[in-house]
Amino acid sequence: MNKLRLQGGFTLIELMIAVAILAIVMGIAIPSYTQWVIESGRADGKAQLFETAQNLERCFTRYSTYDSDQCNVGDGDAIESEKGKYQVTVDAEPTRFELTAAPQGGQADDDECASLILDSTGARRISDDATGDVEDCW
C-alpha cells in the first residue's frame, strides 16, 4: 500500500518568492515614508519662523525698530526649533528683517526645500540650492 506523506513547511522556491515580494514592497515603502517624514518636519521650521516673526513684530510695535537691544530676539545666536529639526537665524535691521530656517539632523536631507526663508513683508522663499517650488515647500 502506498501511503501519501504530507510534508509541512515551505520549499526554497516559495521562500525566495516571498523574499522577492518583500524586497519590492520595502523598496517602495521606505523611500515614501522617508519623504513623508521630511515633509512633515517642515512644520517645525515654519512654526519657529512664524513665532520669531511675531516676536519681531511685537518689538517693532513697542520700540519702532526690529533690531532693538530691548527685544532680545535672536541676539546673534541661532534659535533652535521646538523639535530641533531647524535652526532659525535672524537678520534684523531697523525697518526690515529676514529669517532663515536651516534644516538640522535628518531634516538636512530635504533637498527639495533646503532652507525656509521669511521676511518682514511676509514673503516666503526657499534657499537657492533647493530643487523644489516655493508653493510645495510652504
Image: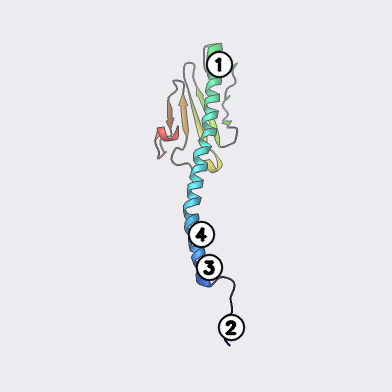
Residue in the picture at 56% in, 11% down: 62
Distance in Å between CA atoms under marks 3 and 4: 11 Å
Distance in Å between CA atoms under marks 1 and 3: 65 Å
The answer to whether residue 108 shows anywhere in this view is no
- Viewer-side residue, 135 vs 24: 24
Distance in Å between CA atoms under marks 4 and 1: 55 Å
The residue identified by callout 2 is 3
The residue identified by callout 1 is 58
The residue identified by callout 4 is 22
Distance in Å between CA atoms under marks 3 and 2: 27 Å
Q: Is there CB contact under 8 Å for labels 1 and 2?
A: no
Residue in the picture at 40% in, 32% down: 135
User: In front: mark 3 or mark 2?
Assistant: 2
SS at circle 2: loop
Going from the N terminus, do you reach mark 3 or mark 4 first? 3
Q: In this view, does 94 lie above or below 118?
A: above
Going from the N terminus, do you reach mark 1 or mark 2 first? 2
Residue in the picture at 46% in, 19% down: 96
Query: Farthest front residue?
Result: 1
Distance in Å between CA atoms under marks 1 and 2: 89 Å
The residue identified by callout 3 is 15
User: In front: mark 1 or mark 2?
Assistant: 2
Residue in the picture at 42% in, 35% down: 136
Amino acid found under the numbered disc labelled 3: Leu
Place of residue 65 in the rendered image (x, y in percent of width and height, measured from the top left): 52, 14
